[in-house]
Image: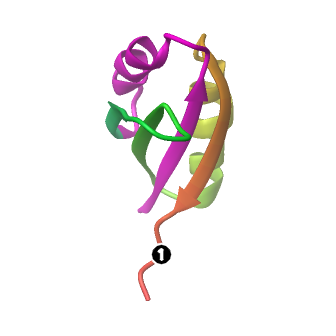
Amino acid sequence: MVQAYILIQTEVGRAATVAEEIRGISGVALAEDVTGPYDVIARVEAPNVDDLGRLVIARLQEVQGITRTLTCTVVHV
């Protein structure tokens, strides 16, 4: 299982709406609206890196109000 944090920037005033919508996407374990340079942080899980990429590109980036994402893959060393 591959896990990652997705740091999300949204249009002004859309953070809560975006967080609520992405919580319903399969593979999203957690989504919170936050303060700081990013508006929403989501923790996602996928069976492999390819599926993680598809989740981010095909599902998350299609949500209305998202302007930019940054994917931070969890590593276990």
Mark 1 is surrounded, within 10 Å at the Cα level, by few (under 14), some (14 to 19) or many (20 or more) other residues, namely few
Front residue of 6 and 58 = 6
The residue drawn where x is 60% and y is 59% is 49
Q: Please state the horizontal and vertical placement of residue 21, each as a whole percent of the image.
A: 41, 15
The verdict on residue 16 being magenta is: yes
The residue drawn where x is 58% and y is 16% is 63
Q: Please state the horizontal and vertical placement of residue 69, each as a whole percent of the image.
A: 64, 38
Q: Please state the horizontal and vertical placement of residue 72, each as a whole percent of the image.
A: 56, 58
20 on left or right of 62: left
Q: Give above or below for 73 relative to 6.
A: below
Q: Residue furthest bottom?
A: 77
The verdict on residue 57 being magenta is: no
Q: Residue furthest front?
A: 36
Total labels: the figure holds 1
Front residue of 54 and 7 = 7
Which quadrant of the view contains residue 76? Answer: bottom left
Image quadrant holding the C terminus, namely bottom left
Q: Write down the residue under mark 1.
A: 75
Q: Give above or below for 17 relative to 7.
A: above
Task: Specify the segment rendered in magenta.
Answer: 1-28
Front residue of 63 and 9 = 9
Colour option used:
rainbow
Q: Please state the horizontal and vertical placement of residue 40, each as a whole percent of the image.
A: 45, 33
Where disc 1 sits, the SS reads loop
The residue drawn where x is 52% and y is 45% is 6
The type of residue carrying mark 1 is Val
The residue drawn where x is 39% and y is 23% is 19
Image quadrant holding the N terminus, namely bottom left
